[in-house]
Image: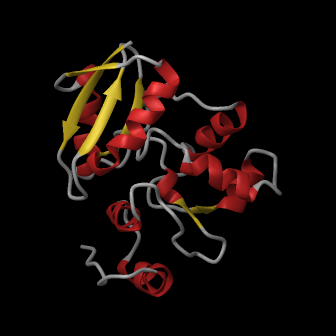
Amino acid sequence: MTLSLDRIESPVGTILMVAHSTAMVALDFSDCTDRMLSYLRLRYRDVDLVPCADPNGYSTRIRAYLDGDLHALDKVPVDAMGTEFQQRVWAALRTIPAGETRSYGDVAAAIGQPTACRAVGMANSRNPVAIVVPCHRVIGSNSKLTGYAGGIHRKRWLLSHEGLTQNRINSVLLPYLDGPSISVA
């Protein structure tokens, strides 16, 4: 399978975006290349990634999101391989508005399986299309920032970028993180 690959510079590192002719199939960070390639090989077996500037206009949309248009990714078509349960979780994640968070329990309830918090967490961690399928918007039930495959520092930046207030970040989220506080304009 031949897929298009673009590299997008961002404040949180180089983003790798992979697409076929009608949808985005993967989005990850360059330091997570091995994980992304494993997913693509599992899905397609033989995969040929061909460098392509702005396939289907998706890179332009990612840059618009990074520049502050928080709705630029809302309608990007995604074609991610996963189980039926994972697909339901990923669809639910796309309904979480930018600048808001949900707990794993909230997502489990939204898909009609309120006791499936851990399974939601596992599906969240296997999301192959980061940012577009906004797994960074899912936090622990105690408002704790929990795992993010791309790194907690990126999750923190993405949530801040989406407008969580400095007060909320410092009072609720930062006590659970290592590192300095961040400034939000």
Q: For the C terminus, give its image quadrant.
A: bottom left
Residue 125 drawn at (x, y percent): 55, 51
Residue 154 drawn at (x, y percent): 35, 62
Count of marks overlaid on the render: 0
Q: Nearer the viewer, residue 153 or 90?
A: 153
Residue under the image location 29 percent in, 51 percent down: 31
Q: Quadrant of residue 151?
A: bottom left
Residue 149 drawn at (x, y percent): 45, 55
Residue 147 drawn at (x, y percent): 51, 64
Q: Quadrant of residue 24?
A: top left
Q: In this figure, which colouring scheme has been used for the structure?
A: secondary structure
Asked if residue 132 lies left or right of residue 42, the reply is left
Asked if residue 60 lies left or right of residue 43, the reply is left
Q: Is 140 situated above or below 150?
A: below
Residue under the image location 44 percent in, 60 percent down: 99
Residue under the image location 32 percent in, 82 percent down: 179
Q: For the N terminus, give its image quadrant.
A: top left
Q: Nearer the viewer, residue 156 or 38?
A: 38
Q: Quadrant of residue 181?
A: bottom left
Residue under the image location 50 percent in, 82 percent down: 172
Q: Nearer the viewer, residue 100 or 25?
A: 25
Q: Is 64 situated above or below 40?
A: below
Asked if residue 147 lies left or right of residue 155, the reply is right
